[in-house]
Image: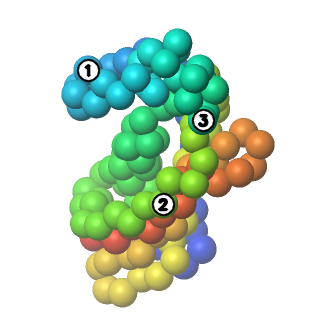
């Protein structure tokens, strides 16, 4: 496959309670902001939020499965967590090629909320397949 600057892939993902609970179990991150509604209601968020790294893991899934695709090697990720993602929200995962040098590419990697706000802003370095 040929790659070019500006090429992108967008996928939608519902951040459901099952995924949040499974991620808490697998990662060991049982922060009550993620798993305890009563606790989360008293927080600055007002209700439970998904783990930020759970959303980032969906970026990884796009890279390895969809775009650039099978054989992509994820080498580096810079991430800024800007807005919470609430359980039940649908987010859009955006991966866009910013630069290509040889067999490596710099990618914009954002997680965008239903209302258009950027929840997670990032940049990744990958080895292209």
Q: Residue at x 28, y 61 (%)?
A: 74
Residue at image mark 3: 44
Is label 3 or label 1 in front? Answer: 3
Identify the element where label 2 is drawn. strand
- Provide residue 107's location: percent of width, then percent of height: 46, 69
Identify the element where label 3 is drawn. loop
Q: Mark 2 packing: few (<14 Cα in 10 Å), some, or many (20+)?
A: few
**Mark drawn on residue 38:** none
Q: CA distance from mark 2 to mark 1?
A: 24 Å
- In the picture shown, does residue 99 fall above or below 61? below
User: Image quadrant for the N terminus?
Assistant: bottom left
View extreme (right): residue: 115
Q: Residue at x 42, y 82 (%)?
A: 100
Q: CA distance from mark 3 to mark 1?
A: 24 Å
User: Image quadrant for the C terminus?
Assistant: bottom left
Q: Residue at x 63, y 26 (%)?
A: 46
Residue 1 shows in this picture: no
Q: Residue at x 25, y 57 (%)?
A: 71
Residue 118 lies in quadrant: bottom right
Closest to the observer: 35 or 70? 35
């Amino acid at each position: 496959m040929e790659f070019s600057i500006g090429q992108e892939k967008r996928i939608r993902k519902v951040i459901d309670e099952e995924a949040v609970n499974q991620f808490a179990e697998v990662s060991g991150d049982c922060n009550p902001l993620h798993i305890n509604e009563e606790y989360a209601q008293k927080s600055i968020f007002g209700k439970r939020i998904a783990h930020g790294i759970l959303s980032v893991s969906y970026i990884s899934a796009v890279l390895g499965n969809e775009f650039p695709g099978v054989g992509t090697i994820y080498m580096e990720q810079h991430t800024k967590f800007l807005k919470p993602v609430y359980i039940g929200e649908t987010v859009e995962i955006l991966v866009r090629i910013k630069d290509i040098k040889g067999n490596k590419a710099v990618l914009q990697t954002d997680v965008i909320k239903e209302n258009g706000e950027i929840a997670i802003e990032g940049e990744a370095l990958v080895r292209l397949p």
